[in-house]
Amino acid sequence: MSKAVSIIGFDTGLTHIAEAFNKPIASIWGSTVPELLGVQPYKIDKVLISGVDLSCRPCSKYGLAKCPRGHFKCMNEIDEKEIVDFCTE
């Protein structure tokens, strides 16, 4: 982790460890949102919170195995280029 240039993750031990090393984090959010859980990246210099603004989001507090509406737009419509650009700046 200490040698990583940046981290792509979500609310897991991986991103918490990245915070400890003050690594840039692209935090990806699908069916839930960081504000709902209070676990967004904390006190780091460079962060991207990636998610899609949808009226059906958040659909759950911790995520679901299947999209209730059947389209899974919260993940399928995430801008991958934005994440790649963030990680390669």
Image: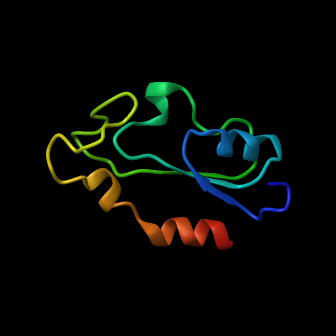
- The vertical placement of 15 against 58, above or below, is below
Instruction: Give the colour scheme shown.
Output: rainbow
**Residue 65 screen position, x and y as percent:** 30, 41
Q: Is residue 82 left or right of residue 25?
A: left
Q: Residue at x 56, y 71 (%)?
A: 84
Classify residue 14 by image quadrant. top right
Please say whether residue 46 is visible from this viewpoint.
yes
- Residue 67 location, x and y as percent? 22, 44
**Does residue 85 sit above or below 48 in this rendering?**
below
x and y percent of residue 74 in the render? Answer: 31, 51
What x and y, as percent, mark residue 47?
Answer: 64, 51
Q: Is residue 70 left or right of residue 46?
A: left
- Residue 56 or residue 72, whichever sits in front: 72
**Residue at 48% from the left image edge and 72% from the top image edge:** 81
Along the line of sight, which residue is nearer the eye, 14 or 86?
14
Q: How many marks?
A: 0
At x 36%, y 36%, the residue is 63
Task: Please identify the quadrant where the C terminus is shown.
Answer: bottom right
Q: Residue drawn 56% across and 39% down? A: 11
Vertical comparison of 87 with 1: above or below: below
